[in-house]
Image (spheres, rainbow, N blue to C red):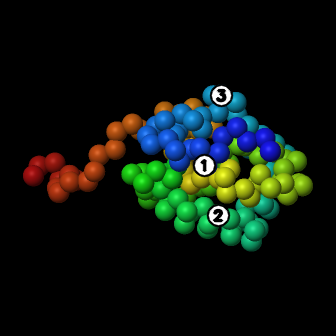
């Protein structure tokens, strides 16, 4: 197995930002877009096999960003491959594609940060009474 990053290791890291750093691709944008073969990963992501695994990951991670309990995802939930998959992995239905130890829930912003190095918002502020009414 070619894993260098794993879910089991990820969840031993307490801090969300350290988890994010653990997953950063450091400018190594993977073959995730698949060029002219993007249709293959779209077939994968619409398959019943993927939908089943996706549900398992969301339940396991409680719908939290990087499976961190203090970072619930309020929008769309993405399932991120910790070790990027390749066109060959999809074509040959290799275990790495569906391996729960290679998958984690992420938000859109976190996914962009992992793949493209965009800076995540570092300060989360809980809602307070009248926080949308500045004159009170």
Q: Give left or right: position of 42 versus 135.
A: right
Q: Is residue 66 shown above or below 76?
A: above
Which secondary structure, mark 3? loop
Distance between the alpha carbons at the discs numbered 2 and 1: 17 Å
> Which residue: 66% across, 52% down?
101
Q: Residue furthest left?
A: 136
5 or 25: which is nearer to us? 5
**Mark 2 nearby-residue class (10 Å; few <14, some 14–19, many ≥20):** many
> Which residue: 65% across, 45% down?
6
| Foreground disc of the pair 2, 1 | 1
Which secondary structure, mark 1? helix
Which secondary structure, mark 2? helix
91 or 98: which is nearer to us? 98
Q: Is residue 55 shown above or below 79?
A: below
Q: Give left or right: position of 108 versus 48.
A: left
| Foreground disc of the pair 1, 3 | 1
Lower position in the chain sequence, tag 2 or tag 1: 1
Q: How many marks?
A: 3
Q: Give left or right: position of 92 versus 33.
A: right
Q: Is residue 133 visible?
A: yes
| Residue to which mark 3 is pinned | 27
Q: Position of residue 22 (x, y in %)?
A: 57, 35
Distance between the alpha carbons at the discs numbered 3 and 2: 26 Å
| Foreground disc of the pair 3, 2 | 2
**Mark 3 nearby-residue class (10 Å; few <14, some 14–19, many ≥20):** few
Lower position in the chain sequence, tag 3 or tag 2: 3
78 or 5: which is nearer to us? 5
Quadrant assignment for the N terminus? top right
4 or 135: which is nearer to us? 4
| Residue to which mark 2 is pinned | 54
Which label was assigned to residue 8?
1
Q: Position of residue 64 (x, y in %)?
A: 48, 56
């Amino acid at each position: 197995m070619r894993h260098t990053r794993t879910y089991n290791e990820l969840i031993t890291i307490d801090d969300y930002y350290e988890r994010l750093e653990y997953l950063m691709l450091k400018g190594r944008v993977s073959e995730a877009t698949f060029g002219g073969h993007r249709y293959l990963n779209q077939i994968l992501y619409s398959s019943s096999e993927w939908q089943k695994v996706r549900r398992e990951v969301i339940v396991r991670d409680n719908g939290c960003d990087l499976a961190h309990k203090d970072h619930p995802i309020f929008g769309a939930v993405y399932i991120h491959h910790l070790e990027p998959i390749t066109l060959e992995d999809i074509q040959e239905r290799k275990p790495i594609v569906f391996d729960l130890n290679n998958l984690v829930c992420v938000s859109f912003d976190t996914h962009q940060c992992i793949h493209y190095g965009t800076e995540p918002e570092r300060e989360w502020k809980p809602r307070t009474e009248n926080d949308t009414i500045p004159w009170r």
